[in-house]
Amino acid sequence: MFMVKGEYTNIINLLKVKLRTNSKNFIWFPIIAALMFFGSLANTITGILYNGGEGIKFYQVTDYSTSFFLGMVFAYIIIMFLYRRINDRLSVFPQANTARFITSQAVNYIVVVWVGLSTLVLYLLYYGVVKIFSLFYGSVYFAFDFSIGFIAAGFFTFLLYGFLIVAVIDLIGVILRKWTYYAAIAFTALIALAVTNIMIVVEYAPKVLAFLVKEPSFGLFTLKAILLWLAVTTISIVINYFTVYHKSQNSITKKYTVIICVVIAAVIMIGIPMVMFYSTTKSSGDSAWITTEEFSVDEIVLDYFARGHEIRIDVSHLSSGSSIRLEPIGENLSVIAEGGAFIYGQNRFTAYLSGTDALDNIQGDTIVIAFRPPFYNVNGFELAEFANPRITAHLEGGTLYIEYVIDDAHVVIMPIWSIAGQFDIFKDKNLVSENPIGFSSSGNSSANIFIRVE
């Protein structure tokens, strides 16, 4: 129905031409991507080689599979609007509506595969280089585990989502080309409504798409994605087949269409918020009393250190009222003396020791040294766990010796295929990033030590 005699030959020949004219883009993408990757790799290697003895160092690598995916979406939207212009440049070659459309889709699908493969190769190169360094430097750690199964499934998921995005954008494109003015007005109204009610969209969009983006089974997701892709592609081909590609477009009609779209967008984006604001200003809210519960400083301190561990030293042999001299060992300990003064400590991975006044007048049988390790969370990883922070303490005569030690740790946070984090088989396996794009951190790099006598 959709293919005339010789159309298959036209499709193959036109596809070759389009690939040839886009060959530079295929070459430039991996080059630019490699520069980004190896720029980050150079920073990581430099840190490993020249930043020893500084406690915890981490190297956050963006999940390029996510950023490249978003970049593809943006590029495809632009290409959709340039569809006519791109095909006009190749009008000297034998072609028809169906040939133009199918070859354009084919090029887009090839780009998806090319971007996915480039991302995978660069990731494996990055991982391989850092892995080699980790064999010679015991302080190098990978935050994520490495799984061949996850790498393969993630790549396939990337392709499926990429193909779906191409199909959906192409469907929007054929609708705009088939019913240009009506479709432009309708899409303008929908986009304006979405922007005006962005919080509602953010809340309900995941629920609408949950059948796919929240599907926990990799097998069911694959089946749903393929069926949806086939359905959307079929609809696009049918609509495109019945579209008059070279239909003349009146410039006056274009002008009025643009004016109508602007008016619709303005009415929706200005009018609706004004109505909502007017309705909410008339309503009154209830008031409530908020009470606070008082806690003593001792309770707060004990609760804070309850999350760490203690060293208990028997001093029952000392007479009541005796004094013990404190002797910090090393340069990683900062003692908070009376009046808030600090002594010792020379780097940011320091342990702050307080409660030393309890040693000036012993009133008890046991010195309790509570230790709270640093809680330094970056993108969901507790980095202090890699550095093994610890304290030692012992009493010699009337002197208490305390040492705080934290090992060097170069932690490489290098995620990939975060797009595949929805599947149950990969959850709780230390494979998927909480923040594929962006950075979050909490806590601090300092430890705390508190002395008390019981």
Image (cartoon, rainbow, N blue to C red):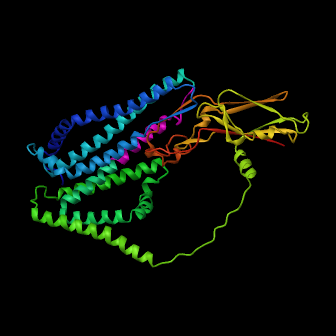
When asked about the image quadrant of residue 116, the answer is: top left
Q: Position of residue 41 (x, y in %)?
A: 42, 29
User: Can residue 373 be seen from the camera position used here?
Assistant: no
Residue under the point 22% across and 66% down:
261
In screen coordinates, is 358 left or right of 449? Answer: right
Location of residue 179 by image quarter: bottom left
Q: Is residue 390 left or right of residue 21?
A: right
Front one among 41 and 417: 41
- Residue 105 at x, y = what percent? 24, 47
Residue 183 lies left or right of residue 136; in this view the side is left
Vertically, is 289 above or below 360?
Answer: below
Instruction: Please identify the dominant SS of the magenta region.
Output: helix
Where is 153 relative to 132, above or below? below
Q: Residue furthest front?
A: 339
Front residue of 188/249: it is 188
Where does the C terminus fall, quadrant-wise?
top right
Q: Does the magenta run of residues contain 131?
A: no
Q: Is residue 417 above or below residue 96?
A: above
**Residue 308 appears at what percent x and percent y?**
70, 42
Q: Is residue 345 above or below residue 192?
A: above
In the image, which residues are magenta?
139-162
The front one of 99 and 317 is 317
Does 161 lie within the magenta span? yes
- With 331 as the anchor, is 392 left or right in this view? right
Residue 404 in view here? yes
Q: Find residue 110 and report its horizontal and vertical position in percent.
A: 28, 40
Q: Quadrant of residue 361?
A: top right
Residue drawn 33% across the image and 52% down it = 229
**Residue at x 84%, y 35% (from the top left corner):** 323
Residue drawn at x 62%, y 28% is: 407
Q: Quadrant of the N terminus?
A: bottom left
